[in-house]
Image: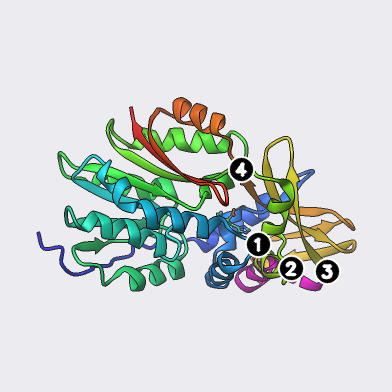
Amino acid sequence: MSKTSAQTQIARAPLTRQFALEVSAGLAKPGQKELPSKYLYDSVGSALFEVICALPEYGLTRAEERLLQLQAREIVDQLPRPVLVAELGSGTGRKTRLLLEALARWQSTWYHPIEISPSALAVLRRELRDINSISIVGFEREYLDGLREVAARRATGEHLLVLFLGSTIGNFDGAAGSDFLRDLREILQAGDSLLLGTDMLKPVQTLLAAYDDSIGVTASFNLNLLARINRELGADFNLQQFAHIAIFNEATHSVEMHLRSRSRQKVVIPEASISVQFEKDETIWTESSHKYSHDELVSLAHHSGFHRQAQWMDQSWGFAENLWIAE
Ligand code: AVJ
């Protein structure tokens, strides 16, 4: 099979209906209202996240890029090969490029980004199209659904490498992160590998600055979620009446983003068939970003059925790239 040209193909699914269902479920919750953080990344949100990555306060992405710049070859050399690559949440491809180029020295490779944002997939395909001997087939799917499809494509003797970079795992709150890794492991075979990026615990003031930057890009990123609900579900959120806040939850070791209602108000969301009452100062919880300790990573790997093969650490920010092998 020729793998010289970058092939692309998108499997589409009806996602707006799903969006409406999840929005209404989250906002109808008694107690803390919430919205799923995955919906922050429409084309506007993805572009704003790119800007966040360039902010002096937000060192996470630069730390991971530095790590991969220094270590991509060593990481690839430790992989069981031949290997088929799946990536959960594709980002812009800058980090992925470093790994795929290192891999291309050894073999021609199928690369399968799995991503619910069609605009992010399009950017990625454009970005990586020029790498020799890499063939791209993207899946517009939820992570595990997409991964099952990729796993079904593997040839006998081929190992799967799953990339889960950028500490996106930290967006699963509480037990959901370890449940997710266990479900992911179930799709893999023994000997398959997971490259997991994790942002490490660091001083609270560093963390809060990273999620509440001085020029308000993160605030716009967060508020865009309401703007998106206005655009796609016909809602009437008045963005002036909500404020971005970031807090560090000491109990869960997570930075939380919320949107705080500046007044008592009612919002109508026609496409989700609901109207929502907000009290003054009531918040919508929009994202958790968990920060890891070394011990926690050890037990997380163990409990989800992986062996910790290697770890590369960026000390200046506090970010780890973890290579785990399925047991
Ligand atoms: C893309 C999930 C890694 O949690 O740090 C950045 C998203 N949110 N600023 C993170 C984000 C606010 C980011 N991840």
The residue depicted at 54 percent of the width and 33 percent of the height is 294
In the image: residue 201, left or right of residue 266: left
Q: Are marks 3 and 1 in contact (CB under 8 Å)?
A: no
Q: Are marks 1 and 2 in contact (CB under 8 Å)?
A: yes
Say what amino acid the circle numbered 3 marks.
Answer: Gln
Image coords of residue 176 (percent x, y): 56, 37
Image coords of residue 80 (percent x, y): 23, 39
- Secondary structure under the numbered disc 3 in the rendered image: helix
Q: Earlier in the sequence, mark 1 or mark 2?
A: 1
- Secondary structure under the numbered disc 1 in the rendered image: loop
Residue 214 - label? 2
Observer-nearest of 207 and 173? 207
Residue stretch in magenta? 223-241
Q: Are marks 4 and 3 in contact (CB under 8 Å)?
A: no
Say what amino acid the circle numbered 4 marks.
Answer: Lys
Q: How many marks?
A: 4
In the image: residue 161, left or right of residue 206: left
Q: Earlier in the sequence, mark 2 or mark 4?
A: 2
Q: Main secondary structure of the magenta part?
A: helix
The residue under label 1 is 57
Q: Residues within 10 Å of mark 3 (few under 14, many from 20)?
A: some
Q: Residues within 10 Å of mark 2 (few under 14, many from 20)?
A: few
